[in-house]
Structure formats: C-alpha cells, structure tokens
Image (cartoon, grey):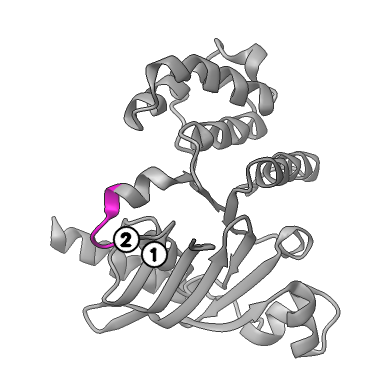
Amino acid sequence: MNQLSIDVRNVSKIFKGFTAVNNISFSVKKGEIFAFLGPNGAGKSTTIKMLTTLLSPTKGEILVNGFNTQNQKNEVRKSFGIVFQDPSIDDQLTANENMRIHAALYNVPKEMVKVRIEELLKFVDLYDKRNELVKTFSGGMRRRLEIARGLLHTPAVLFLDEPTSGLDPQTRNSMWEYIEAINKENNMTIFFTTHYLEEAEKNAQKIAIIDHGKIIAQGTSKELEKQTKTKTLEEAFLKMTGKKIREDETGNEIAKLRMVMRHRQ
C-alpha cells in the first residue's frame, strides 16, 4: 500500500524560457503535516498550482494520493480539499448554502449531505450560524467555514495556502487547533504554506524550502536549524534565502504567469 500522499519527482515548470520551478523532488507521507515555505517569487505558488492540477509540469511527474496530476486530474481533484489564500466563499449566501453548493459540485451522496454539513459546522463552531449570511461573518469565521467546506467531500489531503493570513494571533491559534484535530482524527495529510514561520516551526512535522525554483532544504524544524547553526526556523530560513525583499521577483513571476494564461485564452 502506498504510504505517500504526495510524490513529486524531478518536476520543472518553464514559461517561454522562464524557469519558475527547476527539477524539484519531495514527498509527503500519509497523515503528515507538511510546510512548504519560500520567499515571494520562489516558485511556491507555481508548485501548488501543479499539485492541484491548475498547471501541468513541463517535465517530471506528480502523484497525489497515487493519482497522476496530468492524466488522472479528476481523481486527483476528488481526493483533495483546498483553502485558498484569497477568500472564495460567497458572502451573499448563508453558511449552509455555501456548503450545499460544494456538496453538489463534489457529488457528495444526497443521504450524507445534511449529516456531513451538520458535523463539520459543529466541528468549526459555526452550526448556530448556519442560516446567517456569510457577509456578516468575521474573518476568522469565514476561514473556519472555508476549512469546513474543504473537508465536506472527505479528502485524503487538505491544501492550505496561507490559511491564517490576516488573522489575529488568538484566531490563528484557534485555527491551528482545528487543523491539528482534523489531522489526528482522520489521519488526513495537511500541506500548507505560511508567512508566519513560527506556525511551521510549531506545527509542521516536515518542511521543504524552495528558492529560485529549487528545493534548497528539507527536514524537520530542528534539522534545518542544525544545518544552519541557528536557533529558530525564521533564522534558518533567512540564512538560507537571504534578507532581501523579493518584490521585483514576485512581480516578474506573476506577470509571466498572466502573460501565459492570456496567450492560452
């Protein structure tokens, strides 16, 4: 039985001569909490898009839950849930309506829809708010609803892209309590990115750092600190990637991605 939830093998992504991701390899075990870190423009977003079938690799192979992201896209998509960095909940609908739409999109069996929605909304402490419009929710409540929605079809892997971005420290801690409970109760693989390095240090069982399109380090937080002779993951991260702000690099990558997408249309 395959014990790997994610298996990335010598993957590259090239856009008209621009190499966004350069021959990376890493794997994530079933039930593992895995942090994927990198400066702006390092290739992190491109990698996540390939993992979730939004982009196809130029070279190499990606398996998610044993399915190939290039020729088994539907199977891959059915097997993961995702919480995007940017809000994706319809705030003109109620929490219950958002959940029901997701259930329909993922063909959740009709006899299970009501049960699953009740179970998950109770899990994230939103059941009492189920018939209220999302536009009345706080940022933390919306994030919790997005996590509940991402879990509705019982995925084997949950992708979290900056799941606590913009939230206050108390809400961030609460969010991680939910995420860790999901991981323990369902042996669900959690793959997340974050700019709060203390989150990765505290919660991730394994970390991969990408920079300039290449994986430059992998291991536990303690292993990365030992490699760099530092005392915290943040210090190790800065020592490996430098302290220079990457705004120009981010802009270049986004501009190139947009250009490619316009060309495809």
Residue 33 in the image, given as x and y percentages of width and height: 65, 58
Badge 1: residue crowd in 10 Å (few <14, some 14–19, many ≥20): some
Q: Residue at the spot x=68%, y=77% of the render? A: 219
Badge 2: residue crowd in 10 Å (few <14, some 14–19, many ≥20): many
In the depicted structure, whether residue 28 falls above or below residue 171 = below
**Residue picked out by circle 1:** 63
Residue in the foreground of this view, choosing between 250 and 204:
204
**Residue picked out by circle 2:** 69
Q: Secondary structure at mark 1?
A: strand
Residue in the foreground of this view, choosing between 60 and 146:
60
Residue 9 in the image, given as x and y percentages of width and height: 40, 77
In the depicted structure, whether residue 44 falls above or below residue 114 = below
Question: Which tag, 1 or 2, sits closer to the chain's start?
Answer: 1
Quarter holding residue 174: top right
Q: Secondary structure at mark 2?
A: loop
Quarter holding residue 88: top left
Q: Residue at the spot x=58%, y=53% of the render? A: 189
Residue 45 in the image, given as x and y percentages of width and height: 44, 64
Residue extending furthest toward the front:
1
